[in-house]
Image (spheres, rainbow, N blue to C red):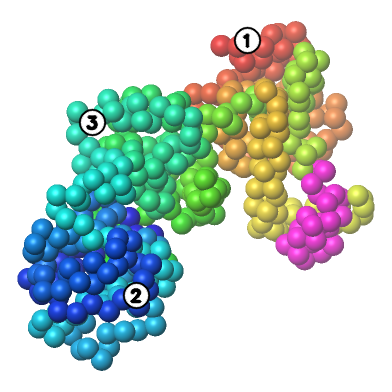
Amino acid sequence: MPELPEVETVKNIISPLIKDKTITKIDIFYDRLVQSNIDEFKVKLINQTIKDVTRYGKFLFIHLTSSLVIITHLRMEGKFRYITNLSDARIKHTSLIFYFKDGTCLAFDDTRKFGLMYLTTEEECKNVPMIKKLGIEANKVQGSDLETLYKKFNRKKPIKELLLDQTILCGIGNIYADEICYLCKINPFTPGNLLNKNNIDDVVKNAKVVLEKAIKAGGSTIHSFHPSEGVDGKFQEELLCYGRVNHICPNCGTRFHKEFIGGRGTTFCPNCQVNPLLEKAIGITGPIGSGKSTLLNHFKEEGYITYSCDELIHELYKKDIHKRNISKILGVNFDIENKEITIKARQIMIFEPEKKIAVENYIYPVLENELIKIVKENDCPVIEAPTLFKAHIEYLFKKILIVEISKEQQEVNLINRHDDISSSKKLNHDFTYPKNLSKIRIVRATGNFETFFKNADEAIKD
Ligand SMILES: [Zn+2]
């Protein structure tokens, strides 16, 4: 659906073409396009001259002589088409044609038939209900509007829905709502009442920036929307987040997610745009043999609900659909419950690391969905996640405990577990973590369990 920048572009294109033209005839092929009295529409507009075209939010206003105004909204796929050759005037989805005195005409084509026109007067224009209820234009908010906006955003609905609500700010649709949330690093599910004044100021600032940039680029050409025949906007090339599901966030390397909010597809980066409603778990991670499982057990004994990602993945591997898909990736049969087959699959993953990566890229998003369910259903689960950073699931945790251990102690632990130290050591080098994440707490695993557990207990309380 065209949004403020696209409608502005349409205005800029048709305005010079139809200004000063006098309507001599109107053909209406789809009556429901006209939402005011259709007979008046057909009669009153004859011999009127177009003086100007303006825009408010996503509405266009065609101003005519005799103080008449046509309010129009393109909705999903409405398009204006200016024609100089009358034989081309009516095409498959044409809903209406204005014929002008000079032999040209303006058609309104609409495949989805959601577009509308409404005839009113300059005087009445602002009182027409669909116009009266509109909020401030999203690219024109002034400092004096902010207090009103703080109140209007102070609702339990997700910010994404509030941005689409034209009675609060008008002109924003699905594309720019996703872009604004991404620029503000606000998760689109965040209820408006969890945002503070700085957050709202940021939303207002970024809305202006992105809409103005998009207007300059002639809007975004998405799906079938073109501002005019043969004319494309360019802003789709600059979109950072909208439509980029499964692409990698340029800021943090996480896969963009897509979910539905109020029926609208919504793309966001779960790590740059943390959902405060999901940031509930305590994570335990660290190199192999550092004592993560020991720590998980400690929390279990303390009464926490605990999960181990290794165990969760092991359960996932048992499911037929994943067996099938991983077999395809590896090119050999994959069955975790068959020891011989598993050894063979492991060997392939060691000798062909790109296949190991492909399996990880397949299973991590599946695991991620399981973890989202766990976090939604439990108050403060403790989750042992060796690949927490690799899988980019930081956003599920309010605290992340990294177990640090000396090399000597680690080797002792691995020998006690009967692990092959030479291959395990290799894995150890893999473990890196972001140094600037404020929710990380380092817990040193000493040989002494009592101090180890005490350090961990303190780390989750601070
Ligand atoms: Zn990101």
Foreground tag (3 vs 2): 2
- Residue 311: within the magenta? no
**Residue drawn at (24%, 67%) of the image:** 41
> Which of the 4 image quadrants contains residue 349?
bottom right
Q: Which residue is mark 2?
A: 95
Where disc 3 sits, the SS reads: helix
State which region is magenta: 314-336
In the image, is residue 441 above or below residue 75?
above
Numbered circle sitting on residue 109: none
In the image, is residue 44 above or below residue 136?
below
Give x and y (percent) for residue 265: 51, 52
Where disc 1 sits, the SS reads: helix
Q: Is residue 285 left or right of residue 303?
A: left
Q: Amino acid at mark 2?
A: Ser
Q: Which residue is mark 3?
A: 145
**Residue drawn at (59%, 31%) of the image:** 278
Q: Which residue is mark 1?
A: 458
Q: CA distance from mark 1 to mark 3?
A: 45 Å
In the image, is residue 97 above or below residue 170?
below
Q: Amino acid at mark 1?
A: Glu
